[in-house]
Structure formats: C-alpha cells, structure tokens
Image (cartoon, rainbow, N blue to C red):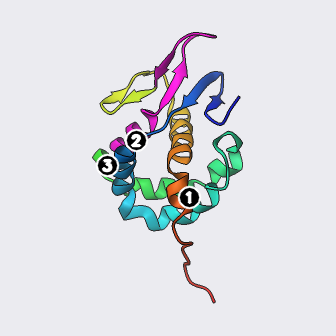
Amino acid sequence: MNERDFEVGTRKFKLNKIDAFKQFHIVRRLAPILGDLLPVAHKLSKVSPDQMGEDQFQALSPIMVGISKLSDEDANRVLLGLCSAVEMQQMPAGNWARVATDAGLMFQDLELSVLLQVAAKAFMYNLSGFFAVLPQVSHGGA
C-alpha cells in the first residue's frame, strides 16, 4: 500500500488530489472554525494518512465540535468536497468509483463512521500542507 491507499473495515479506498480552487473553497467554509481546527490540524499534519489510527481520530474531537457550528450547506460542501477526492474499490479487485460528487454520495450504504474516516484522510492528504505552513497557534500561556 502507498500513502494514497487505505482501508476502513473491509473496504479499500484510494485518495486523489483536490484541485487548489476546491481546496480554497473548503478552507473558506472552514474559516469561522479555524481557531478550533488549527492546533489539531497542525499536530495531525505530521502524521501521514496511512498512519492515522484511533488515537488520531480521537484527537479530531475539536474538529467535530467546530464542524457542528457550520451551517448544513457549508458542512455538506466540506464533507462532499473531501469525499469527492476518494475512490472506493468495487468488489474484490474490481473497478474504482468515486465515493461522492459535489451533488451527493454515490454509495448510500456507507455508514457515517466510514464516511468521516474517509473525509478525515482526504483532509489530511489534501490540506495538511496548507496547515503545516501556518504559524503555530497559542491559546495563552507564558
């Protein structure tokens, strides 16, 4: 497996790059909650997508709280935008198909937990470089 390939349960996925314009719109929609996201994203930017484990997903809790503050439209745009960059393998050794388009999910049988893991991996693969170059955020202290 390379850094683009990952599994969630029994399903195999492949990450693709999101074009810079779409990345811009995802980050723009996340802008109101970037204060919540930056510390976690900065830590996770040092973790490659294939090393994401349960500890890293638990660290995403502040991101989930931040996402809860988004409008439904913005949350859909972010989630679908991230998932549209991911393909899922059909049947063992079968063709690959996109998980989502900007209009909606392509697979109605994907559970929320799988969908969020797919989106998190797409986020890290596509946007970790953006967050890695931002200055470290301090929330007080000496």
- How far across and how far down the image is residue 117, in percent? 56, 39
| Residue name at image x 56 percent, y 61 percent | 132
Label 2 close to label 3 by CB (< 8 Å) = no
The residue carrying mark 1 is: 41
Left or right: 78 as drawn, with respect to 60: left
SS at mark 1?
A: helix
- Label 3 and label 1: CA atoms lie apart by 19 Å
How would you rate the neighbour count of disc 1 (Cα within 10 Å): few for under 14, some for 14-19, many for 20 or more? many
Q: Quadrant of the C terminus?
A: bottom right
Q: Secondary structure at mark 3?
A: helix
Amino acid marked by disc 1: Ala
For image coordinates 48% across by 57% down, the residue present is 65
The magenta segment: 76-98
Which one is closest to the eye, mark 2 or mark 1?
2
Answer with mark 2 or mark 3, whichever residue precedes in sequence: 2
Could you tell me how far apart the alpha carbons at marks 2 and 3 are, in whole angstroms?
A: 18 Å
Counting other residues with Cα less than 10 Å from the Cα at mark 3, is it few (<14), some (14-19), or many (20 or more)?
some
Per the image, the residue denoted by label 2 is 19
Which disc is residue 74 wearing? 3
In this orientation, which residue lies closer to the viewer: 13 or 54? Answer: 13
- Kind of residue indicated by mark 3: Asp
Residue name at image x 54 percent, y 78 percent? 139
